[in-house]
């Protein structure tokens, strides 16, 4: 057997301790550190995914609410002519109504487009604006597609107004 000097024995012991530290670091400590880093990265990724999922769910809810509201508006069975009569009465211009005509047309299988022409003669602008306000806030899907104001021959500050409304409904 080889006889080692105390100095060589000490060097071998130091190398053994150094080798044990390396094995301990690369075999136990480094994998634990890497595992913690990967867990932190996965946690951050999952938090980002949850936030994205939450925003997508909020968008879905908003779209669903809008769709339900549109379905409710389309299923409204009130006639636009009836709505015109009621709102003209509220705006105090019912006596000035010259005519009110409805035209229905099919857009697709279950949807109908209703065009309503209304003419008022000799009305003041405030009454017309009130009437339009009531029509727009009637909780029915209505769009003003044509609006024309002519000066009336009867009196000053009175006008002839022609309005065309478009509305939609489901059969």
Image (cartoon, rainbow, N blue to C red):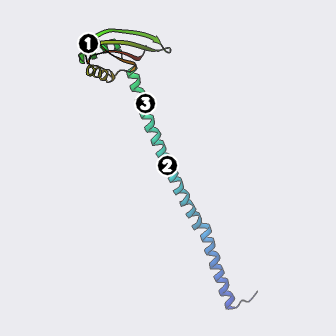
Q: Earlier in the sequence, mark 3 or mark 1?
A: 3
Residue 1 to residue 42: above or below:
below
The label number, if any, that marks residue 64 in the structure image: 3
Which residue appears at 42% of the width and 9% of the height? 103
Packing grade of label 3 (10 A; few <14, some 14-19, many >=20) is few
Q: Position of residue 132 (x, y in %)?
A: 31, 21
Element assignment for label 1: helix
Q: Is residue 161 above or below residue 51?
A: above
Query: At 65% from the left edge and 79% from the top edge, which residue is drawn?
Result: 16
| 108 to the left or right of 19 | left
Q: Secondary structure at mark 2?
A: helix
Q: Position of residue 52 (x, y in %)?
A: 48, 44
Residue at mark 1 to residue at mark 2: CA–CA distance: 59 Å
Residue at x 34% of width, y 9% of height: 100
Query: Which of labels 3 and 1 is toward the front?
Result: 1
Labelled pair 1, 2 in contact (Cβ < 8 Å):
no
Q: Disc 3 to disc 1, how far (Cα)?
A: 39 Å
First reached walking from the N terminus: tag 1 or tag 2:
2
- Residue 48's disc is 2
- Count the marks: 3
The residue lying at 75 percent from left, 87 percent from top is 2
Along the horizontal axis of the image, is 21 left or right of 148? right
Q: Looking at the picture, how far across and down is residue 54, in whole percent?
A: 45, 42
């Amino acid at each position: 057997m080889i006889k080692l000097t105390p100095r060589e024995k000490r060097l071998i012991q130091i190398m053994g301790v150094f080798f044990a530290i390396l094995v301990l670091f690369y075999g136990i400590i480094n994998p634990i550190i890497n595992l913690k880093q990967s867990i932190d990265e996965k946690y951050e990724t999952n938090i980002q995914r949850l936030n994205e999922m939450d925003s997508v769910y909020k968008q879905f809810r908003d779209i669903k609410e809008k769709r339900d509201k549109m379905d409710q508006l389309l299923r409204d069975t009130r006639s636009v002519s009836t709505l015109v009569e009621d709102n003209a009465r509220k705006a105090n211009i019912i006596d000035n109504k010259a005519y009110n005509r409805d035209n229905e047309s099919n857009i697709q299988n279950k949807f109908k487009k209703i065009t309503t022409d209304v003419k008022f003669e000799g009305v003041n602008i405030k009454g017309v604006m009130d009437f339009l306000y009531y029509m727009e806030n009637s909780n029915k899907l209505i769009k003003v597609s044509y609006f024309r104001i002519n000066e009336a021959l009867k009196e000053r500050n009175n006008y002839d107004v022609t309005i065309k409304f478009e509305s939609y409904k489901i059969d």
